[in-house]
Amino acid sequence: MTKNATVLAWLDEMVAMCKPAKVTWITGDEAQLEKLREEAVATGEMIKLNEEKLPGCYYHRTAVNDVARVEDRTFICTPTEVEAGPINNWMAPDEMYAKLTALYTGSMEGREMYVIPYSMGPVGSPFSKIGIELTDSIYVVLNMAIMTRVGNAVLNALGDDPDAEFVKCLHAKKDVNPEERYIVQFPQDNTIWSINSAYGGNVLLGKKCFALRIASYLGRNQGWMAEHMLILGLENPQGEVKYICAAFPSACGKTNLAMLIPPEYLREKGYKVWTVGDDISWLNIGPDGRLYAINPEAGFFGVAPGTSPKTNFNALESTKRGTIFTNVAINNADNTVWWEGLDKNPPVDATEWTGKKVNGPAYIAEGNNLAHPNSRFTAPAVNCPCISPEFENPQGVPVSAIVFGGRRAKCAPLVYQSRDWQHGTFVGAIMASETTAAAAGAVGVVRRDPMAMKPFVGYNMAQYWGHWLEMGKKLGDKAPKIFHVNWFRKDDDGNFLWPGFGDNMRVLLWILDRCDGKVDADEVAIGYVPKAEDIDITGLDMTKDQLKDLLTVDNAEWLKDVEDPQTGIKQYFAQFGDQLPTEMAQELDKLISNLK
Ligand code: OXD
Ligand code: MN
């Protein structure tokens, strides 16, 4: 426990409102966590999986109406609407507190409240931040114990100073009613309130709510950045490691890139990839003036379907022990797990994700999924075979390059480099991705997702771009170089032009060569593209001409992307009105004049 008066006063207030039958502090001791696992198994909240094949692994099933983040019920409650900006849901803080207080009052009667002190980032790192989550869900406690560092060590790091900074997080399952589900950030109060959900991204409040929404706001005020970016280290045959941060919207292969296995001929030469993080980067300017990244998380909350030994061996290995699986299918023959894309042998004696016993192959043949498409694994990062030796480094890793990306059938070339930080900020701001068949709605529709932060920015997106520009000024010539990639370009017959997966390493090598000033490039309207001879295609079933096709920039296509009345860049920027930094408007004018 703690003597910190601010923590204790806040806890008293929340207890008085939620009225739990009992309050338990999470200490971080394994014995306490083990007792909670046993309790969750006894109540049916979790199922223990095959101890021999999946040691320390558990299964959890959510309510069928509670399987994903709920962007339409996620709010940024700043004093004025303009602070939240046009792409966030907003309500005045007082109004939201009143509305939610009514819902929370008595919500934990007869239930136990768990108090989880947690650190985002290694405990005691100058770049780490502390949160305390109150929850009535054992599932949340056990997930938080994988995804973050929890317990007494965190309280010691917070100390007794009543002014010490921490984020106050409150979660109540209540009755999981989707009509009264709210995921609410109060950035000015360092506060997050989540109610009526028990699904990952809505309730593991350290992740998206704190490490992106609240942290992006803190970062603006404190001179650092919280970004939706993986962090990977690329080691060359001389043993030097350079670090890259990369932001992609969902369904663009972020976890796969973070854990990439280089093509065999590069492995043989001695190239390696090290994973520092797969989802979130906190970026600070270090003592030498360069940008340093830490991964605030301690685990991976990954999408299971599609993960296989071929697509992501390292992610799959990470799930082999100490992992919680949510909404995948169970193979009853040996009490293990299965999901679409794991292999070609769906279990015959299966329990599909909602809990129905089915014949797996027959059920799939009828057009059903055994695992929910957004089913997840919560796996400890230390399980990952390629976890970076720098993973726990409290100073973080120096970033050489920032990479933005999206899924574009046309338009964006395989890779291009921005001219400078300001132009790179613009490249991030115009990021877009095409919707896939994996989500409901029309396929191939362009959706703008600046810096992959559309669902996660904790204040006005235009002011966030302004903050990027400020950080660039501070970094000066030490700023990382900024690039954009597109692994998803297609030919006129709809075939992908680039093999992707491990071969993406070939593009990363060009990016690092550019950072080191080792290769020339061609300047085109949108920035710099590689000379075809500088991307190594050894061993690929691809001609130089096909590579050239991947690198071409079609100015007419780009002009359409700027001008499109629904999804165009001009239209998108217009909604920010006078909040749009003039530099962004200038970059747009420059793009248009270059294209013409
Ligand atoms: C995630 C997401 O779960 O971005 O990481 O939705
Ligand atoms: Mn994410």
Image: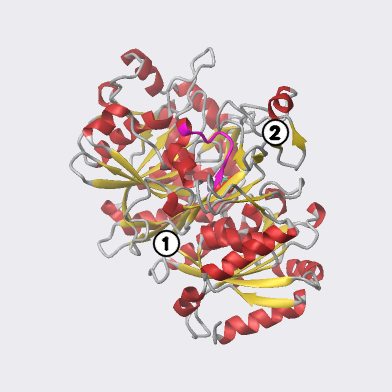
Q: Amino acid at mark 2?
A: Asp
Residue 296 appearing in the image = yes
Label placed on residue 397: none
Relative image position of residue 328 (x, y in whole percent)? 64, 41
The residue identified by callout 2 is 349
Count of numbered circles on the image:
2
What residue appears at the point 70 percent right and 46 percent down from the top-left corner? Answer: 67
Q: Residues within 10 Å of mark 1 (few under 14, many from 20)?
A: many
Examine the rendered structure and indicate whether residue 489 appears above or below residue 541. below
What residue appears at the point 52 percent right and 54 percent down from the top-left corner? Answer: 322
Which stretch did the figure color magenta? 301-309
Examine the rendered structure and indicate whether residue 485 appears above or below residue 474. above
Quadrant of the image containing the C terminus: top left
Q: Nearer the viewer, residue 47 or 21?
A: 47
Asked if residue 186 lies left or right of residue 498, the reply is right
Quadrant of the image containing the N terminus: bottom right
Dividing the picture into quadrants, the one containing residue 21 is: bottom right
Q: Is residue 100 magenta?
A: no
Disc 1 element: loop
Dividing the picture into quadrants, the one containing residue 11 is: bottom right
Relative image position of residue 306 (x, y in whole percent)? 55, 33
The residue identified by callout 1 is 224
Q: Nearer the viewer, residue 378 or 476?
A: 378
Disc 2 element: loop
Q: Could you give the CA–CA distance between mark 1 and mark 2, rounded to whole angstroms? A: 51 Å
Q: Residues within 10 Å of mark 2 (few under 14, many from 20)?
A: some
Residue 210 appearing in the image = no
Asked if residue 389 lies left or right of residue 23, the reply is left
Callout 1–callout 2 Cβ contact below 8 Å: no
What residue appears at the point 50 percent right and 55 percent down from the top-left corner? Answer: 464
